[in-house]
Image (cartoon, helix red, strand yellow):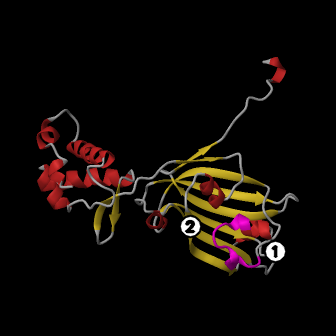
Amino acid sequence: MSLDAVFFLDTLQSGGTGPLYMKLRQVLEDAIRSGKLDQGEALPPERDLAELAKVSRVTVRKAVDDLVRDGLLTRRHGSGTFVSKPVSKVQQSLSRLTSFTEDMARRGFQTRAEILERGLFHPTTEETVMLGLSAGQQVARINRLRLADETPLAIERASISPEFLPEPERVRTSLYEELDRTGSRPVRAIQRISATNVKEPDAGLLGMAVGAAGLSIERVSYLASGRVVEFTRSLYRGDAYDFVAEMTLGDSEGGK
């Protein structure tokens, strides 16, 4: 669609109070959310957009930067700025230990993984301590970009003792499926979640703006025997994931 049909320039210039870049941002956001600007459609260069909206290029840049940070627009180096594919929020329970593949399959999503690193490596000090590795023992690593319906949602970096995953190259889609095959699927886990700002190169892999909100998740998973089987550090898109925990009221102490 031509952006001529999107702008009401008199309204942009004179309607209400507030910075011009916020008015321009709102016009563009409304056009994206209403479908006037289609997914994948390219915005004109800053100079052309400034001329069309009768504002400065600085105003255009600030408005576009805001929309990129919110995930409504995507910058592609050397190509321009495009309307992003809308990302549906995914709710994941914190009370169940499931794999990404299993979790997405229950929601009807088609999943796939792009392998970033896979194999046996010399462990870091952190991996040695967390997994209880012996001196000279290697570590199995599976680093993957996880996609659901072709939308990148997370980067998972899993470390496993080779005792439980001697052939990491066998992992195609689900790590837990392979651990289940070897009788080493974890039965419980401790997970820590914290807010983070996504940095390069992870931002590029996830299709996010540098500095956008993400969720950093560290998980340590255990066998029934208490042995640590998995140490995973993941980065999830903050605009695509909600983690939900069910809580119950315990017995009140002293009858209070």
Q: Which mark is residue 163?
A: 1
- Which residue was labeled with disc 2? 112
Q: Is disc 2 surrounded by few (<14), some (14 to 19) or many (20+) residues within 10 Å?
A: many
Q: Nearer the viewer, residue 107 or 85?
A: 107
Q: Is disc 1 surrounded by few (<14), some (14 to 19) or many (20+) residues within 10 Å?
A: some
Residue at horizontal 27%, vertical 53%? Answer: 37
The quarter of the picture where residue 233 lies is bottom right
Instruction: Left or right? Give the position of 80 relative to 151.
Output: left
Instruction: Left or right? Give the position of 71 relative to 11.
Output: right
For badge 2, the amino acid type reads: Arg
Q: Position of residue 59 (x, y in %)?
A: 21, 51
Q: Residue furthest top?
A: 255
Q: Residue furthest front?
A: 108
Instruction: Left or right? Give the position of 197 relative to 12.
Output: right
Q: Residue 141 magenta-drawn?
A: no
Q: Residue furthest right?
A: 225
Q: Quadrant of the C terminus?
A: top right
Q: Position of residue 23 (x, y in %)?
A: 23, 42
For badge 1, the amino acid type reads: Glu
Q: Quadrant of the N terminus?
A: bottom left
Residue at horizontal 28%, vertical 66%? Answer: 80
Q: CA distance from mark 1 to mark 2?
A: 26 Å
